[in-house]
Image (cartoon, rainbow, N blue to C red):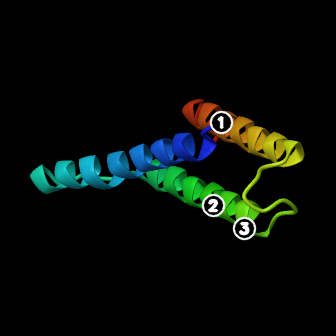
Amino acid sequence: KKEDIAVGNIVGSNLFNILWVLGITATVQPLAFSDSQIADVMIAIAVSLILLFTLTIGKHKHQISRSEGVMFLVLYGAYLAFIFSRSLGVF
């Protein structure tokens, strides 16, 4: 019954990995990005904003309902389909 701690650990770990590890790596050797990587970052930003608005403006603040959870699963499935189609050269 410690959902806040679990979510905090997940978010904190992701932020640490992105900001600290990636920052140190880029300091040692500059990192080049391709167009496909920029598209992935934009998708991650868009989904993060949807999650933020869902948690702050949704029907049940600070909770994700079943329908919203299904929406995020569908978005994840669409993202996987996008990655798969990109690997086939469609995009």
- Identify the amino acid type marked 1: Lys
Q: Residue at x 66, y 63 (%)?
A: 52
Q: Residue at x 65, y 36 (%)?
A: 1
Taking the image as shown, residue 11 lies to the left or right of residue 24, namely right
What whole-number distance in Å separates the C-alpha atoms at marks 3 and 2?
A: 15 Å
Q: Which mark is residue 1?
A: 1
Q: Assess whether mark 1 and mark 3 are in contact (beta carbons under 8 angstroms).
A: no
- Mark 2 surroundings within 10 Å by alpha-carbon count, few (fewer than 14), some (14 through 19), many (20 or more): few
**Which residue is denoted by mark 3 in the rendering?**
56
In the figure, 51 relative to 88: above or below? below
Q: Nearer the viewer, mark 3 or mark 2?
A: 3
Which of the 4 image quarters holds residue 82? top right
- Mark 3 surroundings within 10 Å by alpha-carbon count, few (fewer than 14), some (14 through 19), many (20 or more): few
Dot 2 or dot 1: first in sequence order is 1
Taking the image as shown, residue 38 lies to the left or right of residue 30, namely right
What whole-number distance in Å separates the C-alpha atoms at marks 3 and 1?
A: 22 Å
- Mark 1 surroundings within 10 Å by alpha-carbon count, few (fewer than 14), some (14 through 19), many (20 or more): few
Q: In terms of depth relative to the viewer, which is nearer, 28 or 1?
A: 1
Q: Which mark is residue 46?
A: 2
Query: From this viewpoint, which residue is outermost toward the left?
Result: 28
Q: In terms of depth relative to the viewer, which is nearer, 1 or 72?
A: 1
Which of the 4 image quarters holds residue 89? top right
